[in-house]
Amino acid sequence: MPDVVLQIEDLQKSFGGLRAVDHVSFDVEGGQLLGLIGPNGAGKTTIFNMISGIYRTDAGRILFDQTDITNHHPTQIAKLGVARTFQVPRTFNHMTVEENLMVPVVRLRLTDAEASNRVAATLNAIGLYDMRHRNASELSGGERQLLQFARAMMTQPKLMILDEPFAGASPAIIDVIIERTHDMAKSGVACLVISHDVVSLPKVCEHVIVLTEGSVLTQGRIEDVREDARVIEAYLGT
Amino acid sequence: MKISSLWGYLGAGLALLVLLLVPPLADNHYITAVFVSVLLFFILAALFDFMLGYLNIFNFGMGGFMALGAYTSGLLTHHFGISPWIGLLAGGCSTLLLGLFAGVITLRLRGIYIGLTTLFLAEFVLFALSNLREYTRGAAGLQVSTFPDLFGISFGRGDPLSLYYLLFVICVVIYASLHFLVRSRVGLVFKAIRDDQLGTSVLGFNVVRYKLLNFAVASFFTGVVGAFYGNYIGILVPTTQEFGISRTTEILTIAYVGGRGTLWGSLLGAFALIGLQEGFRVIDEWRLVLYGAFLVFVLMVFPQGLAGAVKQLAGWVEARFTGSAQQEDPEQKASTGPAQDGPEVTPKLPDRKVP
């Protein structure tokens, strides 16, 4: 049985009177590609923000690699091996594409040559090598998605959490992200993906968890979930 | 070698030549005093830029930090007979401690809150210096002794050229340290934090620690410069004109006119603004009007400061010679404010290449 990398136990979070996450529990195994879907306001990004330490939890536990990381600082969580991307890309816009990828390498304590080679290899792998000297602010939204995805990859994570990685991306970029996500999963990295893209998500994940109003509605194979009347109702409100 | 790099080396060489040769060739105390002012404001503005241009830390208390450095050195000499040479380092150490304290209580904050807290701390320092009259002599002024001779060179106030060269050496050491830091991997993280604090945090970097490092380095060197300044002027009075918000505003102005996020732009800013003030003395108070108009002109026409203007010129020359447009310098763009979204173009993925 593969190792469980991430355990979410009875997670809860409220904003004022609004219960954004309500008793959510699930596990993610090493190398697993798991989708987190649901209508707007279902609590998907809130869960991501709690896993990565940006939000404090109200109750519940988050275990990463058997370590309790509940309410730890984002820096500590990242150091343990959790990498994430954001729905609106948070690239370093006044730095070049190459420099964006050099930043995570600083923490890996590589020699200059090793760092350059690793950055160049990653730039090639995502198809941004020719743009390496361009300012990140000059990239399109999709290219910035790709860049922050690559930057997260550079941290050599055990768990990658991707928040709407296909938002604003062209089909060519989406294909690169899907391909690289599969590569990571093959090397044992667990990936948790939020996406509204019903075409692209099945290409990444076989299994999904459906959230609605902060709770897990159902989970299972994506084809089965799609046919579930409760899921259709949650999305369409009929 | 790129023409713009060549320009950089030429500019640095020219600046060094002017700074090294003009004061002795002019052999004039007034010219030397102007060059001392240029160097003092250049290095203080570069330190301000090191914090603001690379980490968005607004230190509104620069004047107060200088005062602490100056008084530490002055008091140690005055009361304990400690050499002003040691006072230089002691001034740096005392402001380092103040910087660490200020950093610990402010650097979790952002923007204007850091600025306000550093301003309040600086005001606290000035009030304390004013009120501890039995030690500092308050408004009566504290006499600061001169640097003792070193290697047979006199650094008395009658030898302004020696003091100028001493300041030159201090500036070279500080500038080289700052330059090394911003070009290092640490500097890369500084710039990442400046662009996106949360984005850097989720990569596993302790943002507060990096800010603290930046602030501590800048504070230490500000104290060293303050200690030199105290010995240079000879008498310390804790007034707001000397060490308060007006002093900080002068430093800030030179940093902005020079060009944020460049370090070397501060030298252009110092030459331009001090040169303007001194060169137009003949028109008395009207030079202040001219000064104000110049500030507005530079910030409107060259929002990236004089350094940005020089870079534009270098880019234009490079384009003329090579026929290629110069790539915009990301550090310069950063100096103008928040990021602008890039054009939404359909990306064309390039063929993979072996690096």
Image: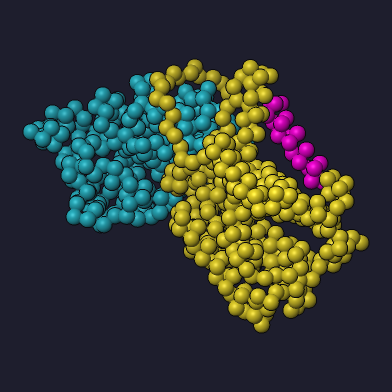
Chain colours: A cyan, B yellow
Residue at 48% in and 25% down: A128
Regarding residue A174, the answer to whether it shows in the image is yes
Q: Quadrant of residue B113?
A: bottom left
Residue A15 is a magenta residue: no
The part of the chain drawn in magenta is B1-20
- Residue A81 vs A125, above or below: the answer is below
Q: Quadrant of residue A82?
A: top left
Using the image as rendered, state which of residue A44 and residue A16 is in the foreground.
A16
Measured as percent of width and height from the top left, residue B85 is found at: 78, 65
Residue at 65% in and 42% down: B265
User: Which of the image's four quarters has the C terminus of chain A?
Assistant: top left
Residue at 71% in and 34% down: B8
The single residue placed furthest to the right in the displayed view is B152
Measured as percent of width and height from the top left, residue B242 is found at: 65, 64
Residue B14 is a magenta residue: yes
Residue at 55% in and 49% down: B52
Q: Main secondary structure of the magenta part?
A: helix
Using the image as rendered, state which of residue B227 and residue A98 is in the foreground.
B227
Q: Is residue A128 left or right of residue A169?
A: right
User: Which of the image's four quarters has the N terminus of chain A?
Assistant: top left
- Residue A212 vs B242, above or below: the answer is above
Q: Is residue B54 left or right of residue A80?
A: right
Q: Is residue B12 left or right of residue B260?
A: right
